[in-house]
Image (tube, helix red, strand yellow):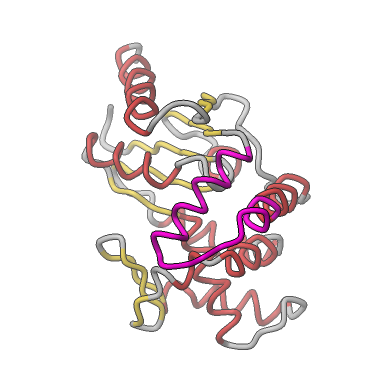
Amino acid sequence: MGKSVIITIDGPSGVGKTTVAKKLAKILNFGYIDTGAMYRTLALAVKRDSISLNNNNALAQLAHDLPSRVKFKNDIVYLDNEDVTENIRTEEIGIMASLVSQRLEVRNALWKWQRALAINKVIFEGRDMGTVVFPNAFIKFYLTAEATVRAERRLKQLRQMGGNPDPGEIYEKILQRDKQDTIRSLAPLKPASDAITIDTTCIGVNKVVDKMLDYIFSKNAGG
């Protein structure tokens, strides 16, 4: 692999993108960017700044200013110098992030931010990394899994954070988020035409990473 290499990992919530991306980045000694955290942090800022989801100008300005208000350090997300790592992982913020991301002005601002971070060797995790932001990435992955399994994983995550979520509600929100992300006209969630799809329903993180490494090194060996 050359000096500048971009790997993208896309997919819906609950497929294991974050865990897989972090592990892969550590093995390859790559940088790692969680673009979903960017949209979630934006959604939290929208809520805290009391901005209406119908106010396109205010949303666009907030998205433009976000890089100056947000810092990522050692898996911790800071908004205005406050640790909001857990705050951005609620179901409410996830749904709001999906709604906010449907605005072209918002996406343009965050796409610009993401592309500015594409320096040297980086793994970008998100929903439109391979289809829109980095169409010429070195290699693209798309992770998928059955909705019931993704809901179970989300339940486990929320319980580890100290929550007591309702299983049925979590499952419905998974489906709601899927629908919002896949039917939107702007950068809908879907695998890139040249993406490698991996179903994580029945396999663990290590197996997924092993599969990715096989594809990566095979592609690298082939030039």
Measured as percent of width and height from the top left, residue 108 is found at 61, 61
Residue at position x 50%, y 56% in the image: 36
Magenta residue check for 140: no
Q: Quadrant of residue 86?
A: bottom left
What is the total number of numbered labels drawn onto the structure image?
0
Residue at position x 37%, y 34% in the image: 205
Q: Which residues are magenta?
A: 147-172
Quadrant containing the C terminus in the rendered view: top left
Residue at position x 32%, y 19% in the image: 220
For this view, does 208 lie left or right of residue 28?
Answer: right
Which of these two is toward me, 160 or 96? 160
Measured as percent of width and height from the top left, residue 124 is found at 42, 46
Q: Quadrant of residue 62?
A: bottom right
Q: Quadrant of residue 96?
A: bottom right
Is 175 located above or below residue 24 in the figure?
A: below
Measured as percent of width and height from the top left, residue 176 is found at 72, 53
Which residue in the rendered view is the most extreme toward the top? 222
Which of these two is toward me, 103 or 142? 142
Measured as percent of width and height from the top left, residue 155 is found at 51, 53
Quadrant containing the N terminus in the rendered view: top left
Residue at position x 39%, y 83% in the image: 80
Is 98 located above or below residue 194 in the figure?
A: below
Main SS of the magenta part reads helix
Is residue 133 visible to us here? Answer: no
